[in-house]
């Protein structure tokens, strides 16, 4: 029993254009050579044990640790917002990247999951980080799709620090992720 006054959530009706948005282990999400997903590893913002551990594979050497998925059939010359819930693990920086959203450019932002701030961000309409309790943040980026582009490549990276995605792939890099969304509009909805 929550004790507060009831309220109405007033926001537009939107569609999440991502499948398996709470199951990053699914093959729908492509893992680069350095990425591993351990499903249902910790409690998500909804209190259920359904958030995933995103970590590097200890492949050795240096490289990136990324998951991504392509969404086609979107509307050109329209704003889209990519968002996800994230919690720091061994790393406290995450990168959301809209790869090639206008046919040639990446739009991206780095987010600090320890201090709740947006770091380096490039070619974006906007970026946002909001705290949801228990160490969870919702991070989002918004871009304007190109006039002839209808495909969105949603990418999530573990970052070493602000502006740096190259990691030592030794098994020590990790974050927690949950609830990705790609929606038409200039901000993330619930």
Image (spheres, rainbow, N blue to C red):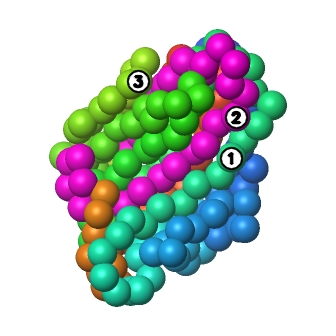
Q: Is residue 171 left or right of residue 25?
A: left
In this rendered view, identify the residue nearer to me: 85 or 72: 72
**Where residue 144 sits in the image (x, y, percent)?**
54, 18
Quadrant where the image shows the N terminus? top right
Looking at marks 1 and 3 on the same chain, the residue that comes earlier in the sequence is marked by: 1
Q: Residues within 10 Å of mark 2 (few under 14, many from 20)?
A: many
Q: Which residue position holds label 1?
A: 70
- Per the image, label 2 sits on a secondary structure element best described as loop
Query: Which of the labelled discs sits on residue 151, or is there none?
Result: 2
Total numbered badges shown on the rendered structure: 3
Q: Is residue 74 left or right of residue 144?
A: right
Q: Residue at x 30, y 75 (%)?
A: 62
Q: Give the magenta range.
A: 137-164
Q: CA distance from mark 1 to mark 3?
A: 19 Å
Q: Which residue position holds label 3?
A: 124
- Above/below status of 95 relative to 30: above
Looking at marks 1 and 2 on the same chain, the residue that comes earlier in the sequence is marked by: 1
Quadrant where the image shows the C terminus? top right
Q: Is residue 105 left or right of residue 173?
A: right
Q: Quadrant of residue 37?
A: bottom right
Q: Residue at x 41, y 86 (%)?
A: 59
Q: CA distance from mark 3 to mark 2?
A: 17 Å
Q: Are marks 1 and 2 in contact (CB under 8 Å)?
A: yes
- Per the image, label 1 sits on a secondary structure element best described as strand
Magenta stretch contains residue 155? yes
Q: Residue at x 49, y 25 (%)?
A: 142
**Where residue 29 sits in the image (x, y, percent)?**
65, 60
In this rendered view, identify the residue nearer to me: 86 or 145: 145
- Per the image, label 3 sits on a secondary structure element best described as loop
Looking at marks 3 and 2 on the same chain, the residue that comes earlier in the sequence is marked by: 3
């Amino acid at each position: 029993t929550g004790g507060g006054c009831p309220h109405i959530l007033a926001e537009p009706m939107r569609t999440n254009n991502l499948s398996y948005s709470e199951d990053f282990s699914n093959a729908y999400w492509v893992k680069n050579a350095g990425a591993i997903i351990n499903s249902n590893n910790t409690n998500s913002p909804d209190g259920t044990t359904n958030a995933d551990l995103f970590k590097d594979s200890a492949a050795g050497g240096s490289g990136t640790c990324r998951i991504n998925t392509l969404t086609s059939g979107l509307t050109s010359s329209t704003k889209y917002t990519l968002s996800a819930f994230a919690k720091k693990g061994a790393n406290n920086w995450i990168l959301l990247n809209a790869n090639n959203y206008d046919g040639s450019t990446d739009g991206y932002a780095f987010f600090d999951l320890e201090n709740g701030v947006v770091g380096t961000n490039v070619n974006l309409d906007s970026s946002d980080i909001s705290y949801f309790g228990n160490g969870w943040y919702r991070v989002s980026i918004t871009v304007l799709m190109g006039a002839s582009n209808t495909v969105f490549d949603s990418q999530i990276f573990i970052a070493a620090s602000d502006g740096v995605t190259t990691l030592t792939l030794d098994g020590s890099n990790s974050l927690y992720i949950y609830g990705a969304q790609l929606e038409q509009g200039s901000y993330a909805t619930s």
